[in-house]
Image: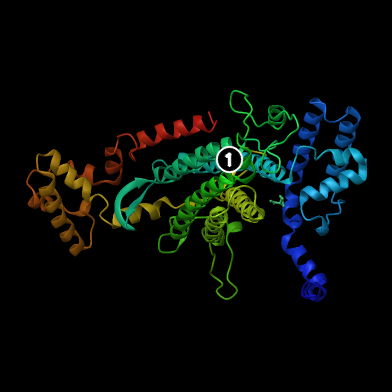
Amino acid sequence: SKSEGWSALFAEPMSELVKRYTASVFFDQRLWRADIAGSRAHARMLHKVGLLSAEDEAAIQRGLDQIASEIESGQFAWQLDLEDVHLNIEARLTALVGDAGKRLHTGRSRNDQVATDVRLWLRDEIDGISALLQDVQRALLRVAEQNVEVILPGFTHLQVAQPVSFAHHLLAYVEMFQRDGERLADVRRRTNTLPLGAAALAGTSYPLDRAFVARALGMVDAEGNPQICQNSLDAVSDRDFAIEFSAAAALIMVHVSRLSEELIVWMSQNFGFIRIADRFTTGSSIMPQKKNPDVPELARGKTGRVVGHLMALITLMKGQPLAYNKDNQEDKEPLFDTVDTLRDTLRIFAEMIGGQRNPQTGAFEGGITVNAEAMRRAAQRGYATATDLADYLVKKGLPFRDAHETVALAVRIAIERGVDLSALPLEELQRFNPAIEADVFDALSLEGALNARNTLGGTAPAQIRTQIARHRARLGLT
Ligand code: ARG
């Protein structure tokens, strides 16, 4: 028959191909700790509600102990034929402890099992990434503390705008990473909710104690109340937590990418504002003078793949009918790669910016090196204090729009002469407006411009010190 012919022609090679196509064990094996933790909790609960004897439960826990040590030591024989991490572990358990192993899957499906595993795994990764985000903030804070009085041009449109403190500039990134941390904490709350007990999709006829399992797995809220998925169809098919995490991760990488772009610009010869340690740069095979900022460039580039993973995950969910569909197996590689990329990037950035702790002295060494003179020269070159001259005239009674026009003229003359506003003689300045007096030079100085912006969120050193104190307390540094 046609179907026999079809299977005779394709059965073997097709099945091998399809086997490889559908198997996930070579990437989802990284969920093994979560899978074992979930099975341990499920087994304890089955015994508690009378569905599993004490002997069987003990055998299961013993078997899982052994499997954990086999996996840890690299001796576990992962099998493609067994499709995924769940079936591999379950088959090994049954080989080790016999019928008790076969009883473990009572009231459970791979659908609620995998959803639980991914949530448990991601919860712990979120904790690791949150800690690294704080390390990056502490690194930025360390450099900021040493550079409160260091002035560089602030830009808009990448044109010199007004002088700002280098510390103020770095603290802008601390704000971004703080918000990122808050987003992760929020995602963690929804991630840490228990699908187990939903079974395949409709719930189970066994009297399972879901609250017991949730508590055993630490899936509890701040008050210690169990967090349990309340609808079985949603429990097995919801991957919102993964999408949310991926969105938070994409935003973190966007912040890293903006910082990278600035580091790259700042260390170009035409700026010369900073240097990063040699171990974060590479040379050129042809140009002997080169030290290229490969690390920030790669971080900027890797932002693309993390943003791409968000698109992959959100597109994966679009159009899936309830409940579980195999599509969801495709959530893993984007999620894993997002976590790996984020973890490595944050770890490297913390060290590249803030340096490494010297175990002898306790001091941090090898972070970014600041060239305060180059920053200062750049701030002086671009008429960064023009706004301050306008503000000075306003204080003398001129309407702001007239002051703006007057200063524009003064800048034009200064450009023609090739000097800064502060280099124009007083008599010259007075020709623009007779109200100008000798104290104008305070306003035209970079320090004067900085000190003048002494309102909440401004760049005055007094404001920056307040912000540093706030961040130090928040990050546990005081
Ligand atoms: N490997 C699957 C996944 O990652 C596990 C769940 C499979 N369930 C099923 N009914 N095929 O989603």
223, 196: nearer the viewer: 196
Give the residue number, with chain letter if any, for mark 1: 130
Q: Is residue 412 above or below residue 60?
A: below
In the image, is 448 to the left or to the right of 187? left
- Residue at image position (71%, 32%) is 217
Dot 1 surroundings within 10 Å: few (below 14), some, or many (20 or more)?
Answer: many
Q: Is residue 431 above or below residue 363?
A: below
Specify the color scheme: rainbow
Number of numbered markers: 1
212, 251: nearer the viewer: 212
Which image quadrant for residue 112? Answer: top right
Report x, y in % for residue 168. 39, 43
342, 385: nearer the viewer: 342
Q: Quadrant of the N terminus?
A: bottom right
- Residue at image position (29%, 46%) is 446
- Residue at image position (80%, 25%) is 48
Q: Amino acid at mark 1?
A: Ser
Report x, y in % for residue 211. 68, 27
Q: Is residue 369 visible?
A: yes
198, 119: nearer the viewer: 198
Which image quadrant for residue 448? Answer: top left
Secondary structure of the residue carrying numbered label 1: helix
- Residue sitting at the far top: 223
Report x, y in % for residue 312. 56, 57
- Residue at image position (81%, 70%) is 11
In the image, is 391 to the left or to the right of 348? left
Report x, y in % for residue 49. 79, 26
